[in-house]
Structures are given as C-alpha cells and as structure tokens.
Amino acid sequence: MLRIRRAIADHMLTHALADHPDEACGVVAGKIDSDLPERFIPMLNAARSPTFYEFDAVDLLKLYKEMDAAGEEPVVIYHSHTATQAYPSRTDISYASEPNAHYVLISTREGLAGAEEFRSFRIVDGLVSEEQVVFLD
Amino acid sequence: MGIICPTLVVMTDMSLEVRIPTILRPYTGGERIVEASGVTLAEVITNLDLSFSGLGERLLEDGQLRRFINIYINDEDVRFMGGLAAPVKPGDSLTILPAVAGGSGATIS
C-alpha cells in the first residue's frame, strides 16, 4: 500500500499534465525505511519523448547524493504514460531498479480529462504487483 | 540503547571506494560501500567481480558498459572519461547507479 499526501499527488499530476504529450518523471523522497514519501522532486526527462523517460545522468547522481546526505531514499518513482493506461510497460519492468520503491504511473491519455489515472505498483525481479493508494490529507 | 558500531571499510593503499546501489547489494552481502583496486575502470570491474561474483555481468554486456548503468568517478560520468579505459587512482570514489528509466515504450527511438 502506498500512503501519500494528496498535495504531493497533486504536484505529480500537475507535472504530468504540464509535460504532456511527453512523459514526465520524478521522485518523492522520504526518510530511509519510513515508507513515507515527503519531498517532491520533479526531474527532467532527458529523453524528452512521449514513449520513454530517463533521468539525466548528472541529475541522477546529484539526486542520489542529496538523498544520501539527508538519510533519504526514493520512496516513490513516478512517470506518466501519455497515450496508454497507467500500467507498467515491458520497458518499465525491464528498467525498474529500485526494489523498495513504489512505482507510480499516471496516465494523461486522451479522454480522461479531469480523471487522470494514478496507480501504484511494486516491480521486483520483473514481477509487477499493483497496490492500493491511500491519499492523506 | 546499544553502542552502534559503524561498519569499517579498511582501505589499503591501492584501493578506492565503490558505492553500490540497492539493487546490486545482494552481490556484496548488503554492503553499500566496498573496496576495489585497479588503474582503469575495466580493471576495477574485473577486481570487483573477483570479490563479488556476478557483479561484473550486471555492469557489462558483451564487454561494454551496459547502457542503463551509470558509473561515476568522483562525480564525473565515465562515458566522458573514456568509458572502460577511464583512469582511476587510489582514493578515488566510484559510484554505480542504475538509470532511472522506462516509459510506455510504444516506439523507442
């Protein structure tokens, strides 16, 4: 189960809509082992693509150093799908490399206006399991 | 509350520290930072694989650095330092980070 403050989820959604039709991506960091996503960190999609995302390599190192120094880890890793449903693709599964993270997918595909999908998954050893999302006020 | 003893990494003269990402820590017995030696990145990876069997294969594919593994020497991406030929020296800090990437993948350009 992912527990996340509604305000942070709204930031993620706003980011996804702003970058549409390209995929948006980012992290919500939290204290190690807290399982509580607290610090919203939108990242640039270095691929600038409607079908692919990748954190810039320099930004990635900076992000992990900052999290290390703050005793944080990527509690949530999020990205958008801009033409398909909010479900991990084969690409998502093959690159998933944080077994402890909640992978949040947001769909901004046409026809959803105002009802964008926001779903959370664990991706471990190539296996996807969807989990409940609980929004905290 | 007990006394907390931080894990000590004993550094020999020729060694450098290597930061291991979460997903590769099963290869290092859970250690976040390990020691390795070498004068090029390629040598460091060879030595890492001798100490932590299987780790090399997670970094290399067909003898080249994997596209979606980032390695930094003192905060610089090795892709801009000659890749596997990148020089390393004792005391350097090497960081391994898998790319954070994915996407709907309908067509990857």
Image: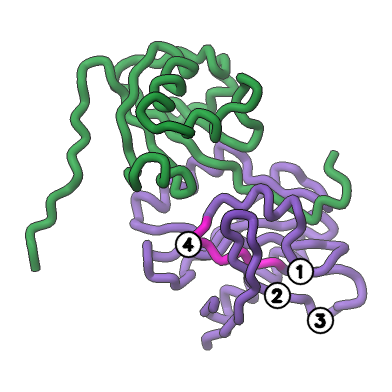
Chain colours: A purple, B green
- Dot 1 falls on a residue whose secondary structure is loop
Q: Amino acid at mark 3?
A: Gly
What residue does disc 2 label? A118
Query: Could you tell me which chain the residue with mark 3 belongs to?
Result: A
Nearest to N terminus: mark 3 or mark 1: 1
Q: Which of pointers 1 and 4 lies earlier in the amino acid sequence? A: 4
Split into 4 quadrants, where in the image is the N terminus of chain A?
Answer: bottom right
Image height of A131 relative to A44, above or below: below
Vertical position of residue B101 compared to residue A78: above or below = above
Reading the image, the residue beneath label 1 is A86
* First of labels 1, 2 by sequence position: 1
Whether residue A67 appears in magenta in the rendering, the answer is no
Residue type for callout 4: Ala
Span colored in magenta: A99-105
Q: CA distance from mark 3 to mark 1?
A: 15 Å
Is residue B5 rendered to the left or right of residue B74? left
Indicate which label's residue lies in the foreground, 1 or 4.
Answer: 1
Residue identified by numbered label 4: A29
Please give the label number shown on residue A114.
3
Q: Residues within 10 Å of mark 4 (few under 14, many from 20)?
A: many
Residue A101 rendering spot, x and y as whole percentages: 52, 62
Label whose residue precedes the other's in the sequence (3 or 4): 4
Expressed as whole percent of the image width and height from the top left, the position of residue A108 reads: 81, 69
Q: Residue at x 72, y 62 (%)?
A: A88
Question: Do dots 3 and 4 share one subunit?
Answer: yes
The answer to whether residue A54 shows anywhere in this view is yes
